[in-house]
Amino acid sequence: MMEIRNINGNSTRPTIGILGLQGAVEAHADMFAACGAAPRVVLRPADLEGIDALVIPGGESTTQKKLLNFNQLASGLVQRIAAGLPVLGTCAGLVMLAREVEGGTASKLNLMNIKVRRNAYGSQLDSFEAYIDIKGISGKFLAIMIRAPYIISVGEGVEVLATYEGRILAAREKHLWGCAFHPELSGDNRFHNMFLEYVKENMVPAATPA
């Protein structure tokens, strides 16, 4: 039987890096730990070594970009993601991934072939919850929307995973996954588990012992 190993060649559970600059870092870590992964907070370039995937949590996208530069993470992060590192961006993390942000605002990491609208649903007071359908997940999922963006349009190669009232809330482009809501706050780890299963399927297979 073929054994699956992480990118370091070790037979182990996947290591999921969680960008620790802002957002519900601990909640993401708890979700992935419950799914059987090994979470790691990423705060500096050395923390990127040996991770099998990365999560960019919510927060404020402009502040996150400044902190990425301050912590000297930006260039290494872009290189790793562009080289195929699976990444999940939630809320502000979705904005960080987008190639285009409405209004001519410069995109943050300029990686995912989508156009997004920041704070599309209004201020913190306009936050809400809704049960939505997500492709690949059976049954309704609680989408928690906090100063949430949404995806205005998707380009070639992007698969829409979820919509709400005609607006795109989640999408995937190969190894790039993004959602406008906060799955880490839902108490439901099915979205994290779906992403983790993708990570496992794309980990480096080890050679079968002779």
Image: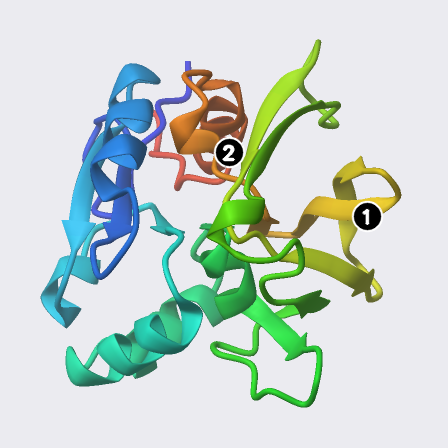
Q: How far apart are the alpha carbons under marks 2 and 1?
A: 21 Å
Q: How many marks?
A: 2
- Choose mark 2 or mark 1, whichever is in front: 1
Residue 138 relative to residue 25: left or right? right
Type of the residue with mark 1 = Arg
**Circle nearer the N terminus (2, 1):** 1
Name which quarter of the figure residue 48 lies in.
bottom left
Which quarter of the rendered picture does the N terminus lie within?
Answer: top left
Dot 2 alpha-carbon crowd within 10 angstroms: few under 14, some 14 to 19, many 20 or more: some
Residue bearing mark 1? 167
Q: Disc 2 residue type?
A: Phe
Residue 28, percent across and down?
Answer: 31, 35
Give the structural element (helix, strand or loop) at label 2: helix
Q: Quadrant of the C terminus?
A: top left
Q: Secondary structure at mark 1?
A: strand
| The image quarter in which residue 137 lies | top right
Q: Any mark on residue 54, and which?
A: none
Task: Report the front residue among 59 and 135.
Answer: 59
Q: What residue is at 16 percent from the left and 48 percent from the top?
A: 41
Q: Name the residue: 54% across, 58% down.
A: 94
Q: Left or right of 190: which side holds 136? A: right
Identify the residue at image location x=44%, y=65%. Answer: 81
The percent position of residue 168, horizontal first and vertical second, equals 77, 48
Q: Residue 70 falls in which quadrant of the image?
A: bottom left
Other residues around mark 1 within 10 Å, as few (<14) / some (14–19) / many (≥20): few
Name the spot of residue 78 as percent of width and height, x first: 40, 75
User: Can you tell which mark lies on residue 195?
Assistant: 2
The answer to whether mark 2 and mark 1 are in CB contact below 8 A is: no
Q: Position of residue 56 (x, y in %)?
A: 38, 55
